[in-house]
Image (cartoon, rainbow, N blue to C red):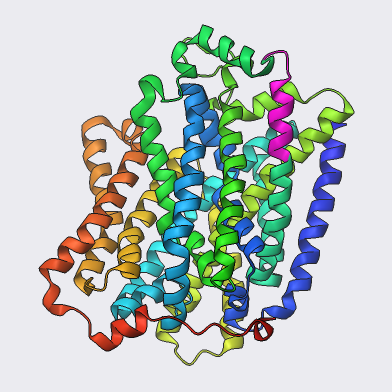
């Protein structure tokens, strides 16, 4: 029965996604329409698009399962950090200046922003390569997380077959409708995620293994008192490093910054800020809260690890299958949760695909073929959407043992490259091209150097567990080195005219003209 209901749910979900893509296709005739929805996206669509792009199946299958097991209830702080630092503060600090400056500089992508803000055309090529190369393993992590859950629900099914379904469905609605289709599907998928996480938490709290919040605390404390320490206990350092990585990393991730480019007007930003923050509180905190129940459903092995095949990655799927495998109601709830994870993965994947395909089409190909027509650019965007989906699928099928580390390396390099030049570019008129280049190089140089040193000293297994530390270090170096190098090279500052143009206000169109 579980599989029958799951198939029906997937068919209905697929139909809705494809219909949205088809209805959105009329608005994708230009690059601006396909990639930015004409910069006319309202607050609710922007907020849900941001939130669903933030939280993929990896948070449930990888992060929540691992940190819930090793940290316990303190892992909920990661969700709090994501909501406060990754959503609320990020929108307050970045949204308005990003929208203003990208309008003034006519920049549609992050590489275009760097080229226009710092008058460095080579920056555009470099940034585009970073995006295309390092977002592939990030997207692969999304695939792998979803494949793990589907294999648990459809016993005996190949994870690769599940990944193919996700790839095809995402490709169809994205190629048809671009960012318009993505934003509307994100809204639908976000509602599913909201309902799914609420049902998951309520049902699991009432399971006999948990027995309500009070009994949950007592049971976890009897296993290990540190599991109810909200400050993280002995795993405090690991916990805080991952809060920094996952919360501040989005400040430099192009698929997240993209949402600020496309929002309709500055008056929409406040509402989008509130909605995306509330969404993040429910999804982020809910996921880690569920992960912290892992030890109540799963025994620990002799090595202290969860005694399930797949280790940490299979903690949450095992909880769900144990709690929701009997009765029609339970099966329906399980399928809603399955759609939750499917929605989370597809929204994140579509955001990654748009960022990567634009990096190749708008930033690389257009650097060589400046006479490429709008129609040809849109066709090329669609082609590279398919190419990126295929590449990330192939990467996901390779034998990479742990998806959390896989994604952490990608976040470290991309966020470490962009966060410093991007933030300082929005606020620091004194930032020079040399300073921006120093920040752009920080990501691959810092992560690569730290990885090499740790492999030489401890081997790859130990080095990959340090991936979050590498990422946070790269981001910190990028933020610090940009102003330092700029002050040392201040004689090469930009002209007043260029800065006045970049930092000037934009003229908002009358409301009637936007609709």
Vertical arrangement, residue 236 with respect to residue 397, above or below: above
Give how far across and how far down residue 226 sits, in percent. Answer: 44, 16
Give how far across and how far down residue 414 sits, in percent. Answer: 38, 56
Along the line of sight, the residue nearer the viewer: 153 or 74:
74
Along the line of sight, the residue nearer the viewer: 363 or 415:
415
* The magenta stretch spans residue 200: yes
Query: Can residue 443 be seen here?
Result: yes
The quarter in which the C terminus is drawn is: bottom right
* The magenta stretch spans residue 74: no
Q: Measuring 35% from the left and 78% from the top, which residue is drawn there?
A: 503
Along the line of sight, the residue nearer the viewer: 446 or 92:
92
Q: Measuring 74% from the left and 73% from the top, which residue is drawn there?
A: 24
Give how far across and how far down residue 290 sits, in percent. Answer: 61, 28
Vertical arrangement, residue 166 with respect to residue 497, above or below: above
| Quadrant in the rendering for residue 205 | top right
Magenta stretch bounds: 196-209
Decide whether the magenta segment is chiefly helix, strand or loop.
helix
| Quadrant in the rendering for residue 234 | top left
Q: Measuring 41% from the left and 51% from the top, which residue is drawn there?
A: 249
Q: Residue furthest top?
A: 222
Vertical arrangement, residue 298 with respect to residue 478, above or below: above
Give how far across and how far down residue 7 sits, in percent. Answer: 83, 43
Along the line of sight, the residue nearer the viewer: 220 or 276:
276
């Amino acid at each position: 029965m579980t599989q029958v209901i799951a198939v029906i749910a997937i068919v209905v979900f697929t139909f809705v996604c494809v219909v949205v893509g088809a209805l959105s296709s009329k608005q994708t005739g230009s690059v601006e329409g396909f990639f930015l929805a004409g910069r006319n996206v309202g607050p609710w669509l922007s907020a849900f698009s941001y939130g669903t792009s933030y939280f993929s199946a990896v948070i449930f299958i990888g992060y929540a399962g691992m940190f819930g097991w090793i940290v316990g209830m303190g892992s909920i702080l990661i969700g709090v950090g994501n909501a406060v630092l990754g959503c609320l503060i990020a929108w307050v600090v970045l949204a308005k200046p990003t929208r203003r400056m990208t309008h003034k500089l006519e920049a549609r992508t992050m590489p275009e922003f760097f080229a226009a803000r710092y008058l460095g055309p080579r920056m555009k090529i470099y940034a585009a390569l970073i995006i295309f190369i390092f977002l592939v393993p990030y997207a692969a992590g999304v695939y792998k997380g979803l494949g793990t859950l589907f294999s648990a629900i459809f016993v005996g099914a190949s994870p690769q077959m599940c990944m193919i379904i996700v790839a095809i469905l995402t490709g169809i609605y994205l190629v048809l409708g671009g960012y318009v289709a993505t934003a509307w599907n994100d809204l639908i998928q976000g509602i599913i995620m909201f309902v799914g996480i609420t049902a998951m938490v309520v049902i699991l709290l009432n399971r006999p293994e948990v027995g309500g919040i009070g009994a949950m605390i007592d049971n976890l404390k009897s296993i290990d008192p540190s599991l109810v320490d909200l400050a993280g206990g002995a795993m405090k350092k690991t916990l805080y490093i991952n809060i920094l990585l996952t919360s501040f990393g989005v400040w430099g991730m192009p698929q997240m910054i993209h949402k600020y480019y496309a929002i309709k007007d500055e008056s929409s930003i406040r509402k989008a800020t509130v909605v995306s923050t509330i969404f993040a509180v429910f999804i982020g905190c809910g996921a880690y809260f569920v992960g912290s129940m892992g030890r109540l459903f799963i025994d620990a092995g002799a090595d202290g690890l969860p005694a399930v095949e797949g280790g940490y990655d299979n903690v949450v799927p095992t909880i769900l299958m144990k709690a929701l495998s009997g009765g029609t109601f339970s099966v329906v709830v399980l399928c809603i949760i399955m759609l939750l994870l499917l929605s989370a993965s597809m929204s994140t994947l579509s955001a990654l695909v748009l960022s990567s395909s634009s990096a190749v089409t708008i930033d690389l190909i257009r650097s060589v073929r400046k006479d490429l027509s709008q129609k040809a650019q849109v066709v090329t965007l669609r082609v590279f959407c398919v190419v990126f989906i295929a590449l990330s699928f192939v990467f996901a099928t390779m034998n990479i043992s742990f998806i959390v580390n896989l994604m952490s390396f990608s976040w470290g390099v991309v966020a470490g490259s962009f966060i410093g030049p991007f933030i300082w570019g929005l606020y620091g008129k004194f930032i020079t091209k040399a300073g921006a280049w120093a920040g752009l190089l920080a990501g691959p140089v810092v992560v690569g150097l730290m990885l090499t040193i740790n492999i030489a000293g401890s081997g790859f297994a130990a080095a990959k567990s340090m991936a979050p530390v590498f990422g946070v270090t790269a981001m910190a170096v990028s933020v610090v080195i940009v102003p330092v190098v700029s002050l040392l090279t201040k004689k090469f500052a930009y002209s007043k005219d260029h800065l006045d143009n970049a930092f000037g206000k934009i003229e908002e169109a009358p409301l009637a003209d936007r609709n």
